[in-house]
């Protein structure tokens, strides 16, 4: 959109939820509007307040402003990175786009694999910003804007994740405040000219959204869900109870191997832009496709776990402090004994959690927190990669996060997950999979007022003993069925271990064949063969490791990504070790 004098132009992706408020304020200041859309409001807000306008916005957005007279470009991304924005500087020139493939379309942009980003991908299962897996291309950080003038670049923040600002809340007061914030956010996120649906998992996060949406909407709500009736836990009864309670127009798909899974995986690898080793991308792909049959906008529950402490890993962070009271030798012995425990396909089985927990306890608290949600430790990567470098996950913790004070530092780990895991895994996954189906997905929990409120709460309002998301469950205790409040978190993951031993095994073998691994030149073929064999023969559950490698190989093939020409050797002190089960030791 152009300004009235056509000297300033805006390219915009996203939604500004408070654009009507801003419009009234701008009209008082003399602006006259030609349209009813939020794009014009954003352009005029920039003309009025320049970059100061960004902190006034509520919404999800990536935008580019170009002023012809000043030869000035301003790029901006929303506070938590719901919408993507990629940037590449080549000499004095700058290239940008909301998709990585937009930049790769330019013939002058090299397609070399970034080794530091690869290390992070293997450790975390995603690529944390500002890295991408391609040298020279970065993600603009959430809550930041970038200004380019004739080859000179300035980047600054207009909002930062708050921490260390705890207020003297009481539980009743916090509960009342959260209730009001959720009502406000739901009103914003339901604002649309088209029907809005809700992604329903049967857990407390999506169920809470359904409850508040039912109060804010006068129309019958449309809900959508993916189930896995073939695995040991079943979402369907929880979902159907909610559908009956709120009388929604519900559409459901059971995700199972009778569907064309290989074709969907190929699509996931293509539309991801960057690979993420999160197997939940496949259900989100099918859920987006299902939702698009009836709506063009849907609400999802991303963010609640990271804001209010919903993951079992936060409890593991705390319990690991007690485990470390045992000698390292004792923990190694326990881990060795678990080699003989029967291997189950269930990711929440005792043996899977216990092995992962003990492996993590042998790492530093920061590295352990990442390892429980990730895949390969540094020592494991030394055995996996032909060459490596000095990249450490620990470095990410040293970038403006709350200081570490030993085991169980909940605020520090919540801040890490909000900055990296939420933005670069969950939100990226949802945005890419949904936009591939022309579906807009909005996350009401990520209204920045809710984020700031959550940061002001004491840790005990989030996790207390065995309880997680204390404040959210307290708020919903009289609103939702007790079964939903008591339900253990399962996540929207496919039965990865089982499917890679069964229906997807031929696809895995083809994608990670010795010939392709050798041709790739980055990984040790014998190590990957050992991974596949140990998983297939049930010596270990390595489905998530193999899934991440498979998606990476597909992505590199799709986009013709070349290995970096210069890879540094690992330091001499870092010796190669076997990958399991004691290999978490760094």
Image (cartoon, helix red, strand yellow):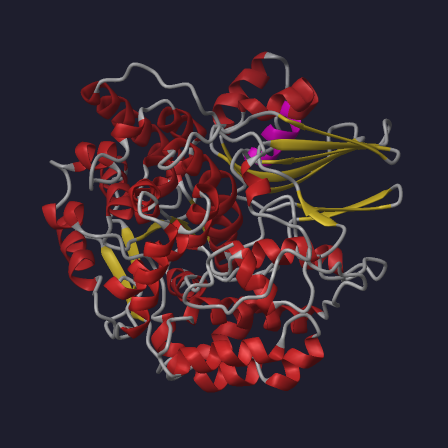
Q: Which of 216 and 509 is in front in this view?
A: 509
Residue at x 15% of width, y 47% of height: 486
Q: Quadrant of residue 572?
A: bottom right
Q: Position of residue 126 (x, y in %)?
A: 54, 55
Asked whether, in this view, residue 68 is left or right of residue 505, the answer is right
In the figure, 509 relative to 354: above or below?
below
In the figure, 26 relative to 485: above or below?
above
Asked whether, in this view, residue 466 is left or right of residue 198, the answer is left
Region of the chain picked out in magenta, as a range: 37-45
Quarter of the image with the N terminus in it: top right
Residue 409 visible somewhere in the drawing: yes
Residue 296 visible somewhere in the drawing: no
Q: Where is residue 78 in the image (x, y as percent from the top left)?
A: 56, 35
Residue at x 26% of width, y 38% of height: 469
| Main secondary structure found in the magenta portion | helix
Q: In which quarter of the image is residue 516?
A: bottom right
Asked whether, in this view, residue 558 is left or right of residue 537, the answer is right
Asked whether, in this view, residue 364 is left or right of residue 398, the answer is left
Residue at x 26% of width, y 35% of height: 463
Q: Where is residue 498 in the image (x, y as percent from the top left)?
A: 34, 76
- Is 283 in the magenta? no
Residue at x 46% of width, y 58% of height: 584
The image shows a total of numbered marks equal to: 0
Q: Position of residue 290 (x, y in %)?
A: 38, 65
Q: Which of 64 and 532 is in front in this view?
A: 532
């Amino acid at each position: 959109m152009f300004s009235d004098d056509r000297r300033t132009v805006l390219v915009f992706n996203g939604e500004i939820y408070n654009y009507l408020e801003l419009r009234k304020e701008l009209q008082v200041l003399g602006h006259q509007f030609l349209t009813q859309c939020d794009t014009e409001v954003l352009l005029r807000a920039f003309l009025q307040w320049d970059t100061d306008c960004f902190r006034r916005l509520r919404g999800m957005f990536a935008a580019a402003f170009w002023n012809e007279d000043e030869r000035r470009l301003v790029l901006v991304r929303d506070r938590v990175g719901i919408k993507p924005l990629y940037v590449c500087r080549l000499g004095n020139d700058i290239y940008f786009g909301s998709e990585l493939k937009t930049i790769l379309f330019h013939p002058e942009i090299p397609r070399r694999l970034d080794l530091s980003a690869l290390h992070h991908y293997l450790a975390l299962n995603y690529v944390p910003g500002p890295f991408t897996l391609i040298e020279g291309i970065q993600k603009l950080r959430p809550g930041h804007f970038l200004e380019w003038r004739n080859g000179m670049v300035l980047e600054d923040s207009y909002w930062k994740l708050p921490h260390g600002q705890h207020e003297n809340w009481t539980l009743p007061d916090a509960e009342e405040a959260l209730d009001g914030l959720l009502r406000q956010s739901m009103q914003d996120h339901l604002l649309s000219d088209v029907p809005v649906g809700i992604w329903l998992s049967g857990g407390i996060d999506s169920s809470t959204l359904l409850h508040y949406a039912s109060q804010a909407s006068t129309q019958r709500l449309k809900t959508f869900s993916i189930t896995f009736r073939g695995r040991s836990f079943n979402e369907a009864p929880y979902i159907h109870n909610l559908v009956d309670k709120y009388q929604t127009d519900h559409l459901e798909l059971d995700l199972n191997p009778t569907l064309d899974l290989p074709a969907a995986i190929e699509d996931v690898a293509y539309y991801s832009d960057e690979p993420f080793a999160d197997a939940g991308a496949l259900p989100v792909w099918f859920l987006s496709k299902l939702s698009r049959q009836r709506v063009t906008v849907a609400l999802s529950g991303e963010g609640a776990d990271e804001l209010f402490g919903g993951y079992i890993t936060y409890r593991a962070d705390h319990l690991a402090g007690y485990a470390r009271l045992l000698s390292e030798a004792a923990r190694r012995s326990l881990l060795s004994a678990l080699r003989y425990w029967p291997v189950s396909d269930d990711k929440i089985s005792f043996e899977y959690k216990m092995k992962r927990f003990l492996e993590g306890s042998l790492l530093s608290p920061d590295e352990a927190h990442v390892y429980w949600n990730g895949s390969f430790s540094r020592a494991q990567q030394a055995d996996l990669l032909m060459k490596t470098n000095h990249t450490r996950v620990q470095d990410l913790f040293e970038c403006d996060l709350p200081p570490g004070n030993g085991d169980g530092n909940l605020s520090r780990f919540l801040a890490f997950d909000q900055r990296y895991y939420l933005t670069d895994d969950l939100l990226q996954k949802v945005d890419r999979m949904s936009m591939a189906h022309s579906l807009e997905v909005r996350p009401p929990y990520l209204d920045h007022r809710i984020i700031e409120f959550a940061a002001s709460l004491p840790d005990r309002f989030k996790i207390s003993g065995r309880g997680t998301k204390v404040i959210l469950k307290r708020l919903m205790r009289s609103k939702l069925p007790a079964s939903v409040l008591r339900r253990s978190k399962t996540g929207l993951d496919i039965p990865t271990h089982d499917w890679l031993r069964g229906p997807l095994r031929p696809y895995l073998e083809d994608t990670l064949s010795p010939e392709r691994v050798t041709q790739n030149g980055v990984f040790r073929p014998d190590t990957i063969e050992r991974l596949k064999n140990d998983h297939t023969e049930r010596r270990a559950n390595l489905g998530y490791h193999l899934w991440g490698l498979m998606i990476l190989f597909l992505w590199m093939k799709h986009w013709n990504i070349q290995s970096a020409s210069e890879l540094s050797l690992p330091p001499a002190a870092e010796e190669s070790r076997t990958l399991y089960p004691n290999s978490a030791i760094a």
